[in-house]
Image (spheres, coloured by chain):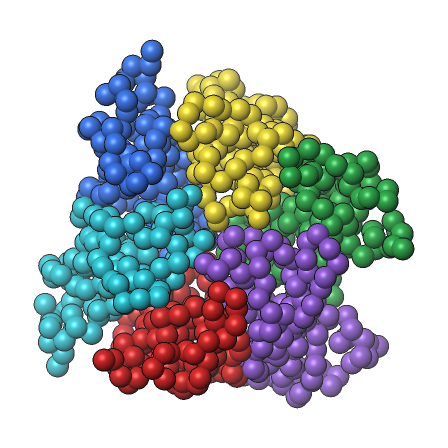
Chain colours: A purple, B red, C cyan, D blue, E yellow, F green
Amino acid sequence: MITLKERIVNSETRIFKAVFPNTTNHYDTLFGGTAMHMMDEAAFICATRFSRKKVVTISTSQIDFTKAIPQGTIVELIARIEKVGNTSCVVRVEIYKEDMYNYDRELAVAGTFTFVAINDEKKPIKIIDNA
Amino acid sequence: MITLKERIVNSETRIFKAVFPNTTNHYDTLFGGTAMHMMDEAAFICATRFSRKKVVTISTSQIDFTKAIPQGTIVELIARIEKVGNTSCVVRVEIYKEDMYNYDRELAVAGTFTFVAINDEKKPIKIIDNA
Amino acid sequence: MITLKERIVNSETRIFKAVFPNTTNHYDTLFGGTAMHMMDEAAFICATRFSRKKVVTISTSQIDFTKAIPQGTIVELIARIEKVGNTSCVVRVEIYKEDMYNYDRELAVAGTFTFVAINDEKKPIKIIDNA
Amino acid sequence: MITLKERIVNSETRIFKAVFPNTTNHYDTLFGGTAMHMMDEAAFICATRFSRKKVVTISTSQIDFTKAIPQGTIVELIARIEKVGNTSCVVRVEIYKEDMYNYDRELAVAGTFTFVAINDEKKPIKIIDNA
Amino acid sequence: MITLKERIVNSETRIFKAVFPNTTNHYDTLFGGTAMHMMDEAAFICATRFSRKKVVTISTSQIDFTKAIPQGTIVELIARIEKVGNTSCVVRVEIYKEDMYNYDRELAVAGTFTFVAINDEKKPIKIIDNA
Amino acid sequence: MITLKERIVNSETRIFKAVFPNTTNHYDTLFGGTAMHMMDEAAFICATRFSRKKVVTISTSQIDFTKAIPQGTIVELIARIEKVGNTSCVVRVEIYKEDMYNYDRELAVAGTFTFVAINDEKKPIKIIDNA
C-alpha cells in the first residue's frame, strides 16, 4: 500500500513557462496576477494528484514576490504538499526564475494554498482515506 | 490641495465581470487562479491611482475564498486603500458574487495586496509625496 | 417598491482595466476590437442587472473612437441604461482613458448597445415587469 | 498599374473560426463582444491590405446581430471595402454562421467600420496615393 | 449531386490574422506554437466542411517553419484537402506572411494534418458517404 | 565541466496542466491545436535550457494523437533532448493524460521538434560550444 510519504513525493507538480509578452504588464515583467493564476493551477493539480478527490481552494497564505521576472526569462513552478489535515491539505508553491542564456536561477515568488476535499453535495470529506 | 482621505476615496476601483466558460474550472465555477488574477489587477490599478507612481506587488495577505462562484453569475471586485506606509500601501480587494436573475449578492473572496512605489532604478520611494 | 429611476441608478456598471501588452495592436495602443469586446461585456452586465432577465445584444449604434489609448494607461468603462423600451433597453457605454502617473482623464470611446429580453424559447418578453 | 477596383478585390479578407467554449457566453452562444473583436480584426486587415498604410478605427456604424451563433458551429467573416474617401475608407464585415454537419449557412451579424490612414505624427493622410 | 472535386473546392478554408503582441515570443516574432494552434484550427474547419462529419486530428506530418513572422505583419492560412482515404482525409495548411505596408508575400510555414471521421461511439466511419 | 549527458538530463522540462473549458473544442476534449501550442512551448524551453542560446523552431516531425484528452483530466508534458546536431537539436515531447480521481495515466500525444541556434544576425551557430 502507498504510504503518506510516497503520496506526497508522487504528487509534486512542476510547471515550466516562458515569459512572453502575453503574460507581462507594461513594465515588461511578469504580471503578479498572472503569477498567482499559475501558482493556483500548480497547487490545484498537486492537491488533486495527492488526494485523487475533488478539491477547492479555500485560502492562500501570504504570498511574497521577492524578485521581478522580466520578459524573456523562464520560470519553473514547484508545488508540494506541506501539511495534511483531516479534510484539507496545504500546498507550498515556489516560482523560480531562470535566465535563458546562462545558469542563473533564483527563488522569485512563494506562498501556500489550502484546499479542502468535498463530495458532490459540496460537504467536506476526508482528504485521503487512509489518513 | 488634495487630502489623504480624498486620495483614498478617489482611488477606489471597481470591476464588474460576467463569469463565462473561459474563466471557469471543470466544476463550472470561477477558477481560484482567475479570481486572484483579477484581484491583483484591481489592486494594482487602485494603488497606481492612489499614488500616481510606479508600483509593484510585493506580497499578498491571506486570501479567503468563502463562496464558490458558478458560471452564469456576475462578480464585482472592489479595491480600496486600507493602509498607507512610507513607501508602500495596502489594498483590500473584495469579490462580490451577484446572481443574474435576482438581487442576491454576497461576499465571496477577500484579501489584501501590498504594493511598494519604486523609481526607475527600482529603489523604493515615498508612496505619496505629501504623506 | 423599486422605481425605474432606482433600477437605472443601481444597474450602472463600471469596469477598470490596465492596458497591458496582451490587449494592444502593433502600434502599442488598445486594439479597437478589444475595446468593443469590453464595451459589450459592460453593456451586457448593465442590461442584465437592470432587467434581471436573460438578455441578448441585438445591435449597436455608431461607436466613436476619438482618442487612441496607449499601453501603460488605465481605462474605465461606464455603462448606463439610456432608454427603456417594451422588450428592449439601450445601454450607453463610455471608455475613459486615464494616465497612470498624473490626473489626466478624457473620454476616448463611446457608443450604445441595444439588448432584448428573451424567454427560454428565445421569444422577446417585457424587459422589466413593472415597465 | 493597379486599379481601384483591383485593389478592392485584392483586399477582401476572409476569416473562418470554430466556435469553441473559450468564445462563448453562459448561454453557450458566441459572445457579442467576441464577435465584434473578430469583426474589427477582419476590417483592420482589409483596410490595411487595401491602403498598405497605417490605419486606425475611427468609428463603426450600427452593427446588427440577427442570429445567435451556438457553440459547435463555424463562422466565416468576410470584410470588403465598401466606400473610399480621401483619408478614410469604410469596410463592411459580415459574419456567416455555418452548421458543421450540414450545408446550412446564413448571415448572422453585419456592420461597417471606418478607418483613417495616418502618418507617424498621427495626422490623417490620403488613404491611397492614386485615389 | 456534388462531386468529390466540388467538395474539395468548397471546403477550402482561409484565415487572415494580424500578428499582435499577444501572439509573439520574446523575439517579437509569431511563436511557433501559436502558428501550430492556428494551423490545426484551419485544418479542422476544412476537414469538417469537407466531410460534414465529426472529425478528430490523428496526426500531423512534418511541419516546416521556413520564415520568421515578425510582429506587425499579416498572415493568411490556407487549408485544402490533399488526400481522401476511406475513414480519413489529409489537409495541407500553408501560412503566408504578408507585409502590411507593401505587397511582399511569401510562404512561411507548411504542413499536413490527418483527420479521421468518427461516430458517437468514437469508432471510425467513412469520411464521406459517396467516397 | 558539464558533460553532454548532464546537459541533457538537466534540460528535461515538465509542464503539468489541468484541462479546463478554455482549452477544449466543442467535443469537450483538449483541442489538438492547444496541445501543439503547449508542446512547442515545452520543446522551446527544453532546447533553450539545453543550449543556453537563442533557438527557433525549424520543423516538427510527425505528431501522433493516440488518445483523446477529456475536460477534467490532467496532462503532463515531458520534453527531452533526443538528438544533438552541429547547429540544431531535436526535442521529443510526450503528453501524458492522467485521470484526476484515480491513478490511470497513459501516453496520449507524442512528436519531435527541431530547433536551430542562431546569432543576432539570425545565422545558425553551434548549438553548444563544447559539442
Q: Which quadrant of the structure image shows residue C85?
A: bottom left
Query: Which quarter of the rendering shows the N terminus of chain E?
Result: top left
Residue at 19% across, 59% down: C91
Residue F120 in view in this figure: yes
Task: Locate residue B111 relative to residue A38 in the image: left or right.
Answer: left
Task: Locate residue C66 relative to residue B26 in the image: left or right.
Answer: left
Task: Locate residue E92 relative to residue C109 in the image: left or right.
Answer: right
* x, y percent for residue C30: 36, 51
Which one is nearer the viewer's eye here, B46 or F57?
Answer: B46
Task: Locate residue E122 relative to residue D60 in the image: left or right.
Answer: right
Of all residues, the one furthest to the top in this rendering is D1
Residue at 39% across, 54% down: C71
Residue D105 in view in this figure: no
Residue at 52% across, 66% down: B121
* x, y percent for residue B62: 52, 83
Which one is nearer the viewer's eye here, F87 or E90?
Answer: F87
Which one is nearer the viewer's eye here, A26 or D98?
Answer: A26
* x, y percent for residue B40: 46, 71
Residue at 63% across, 29% down: E66
Q: Which quadrant of the structure image shows residue D58?
A: top left
Q: Is residue C1 above or below residue E56?
A: below
Q: Is residue B11 above or below residue B20?
A: below
* x, y percent for residue A23: 52, 57
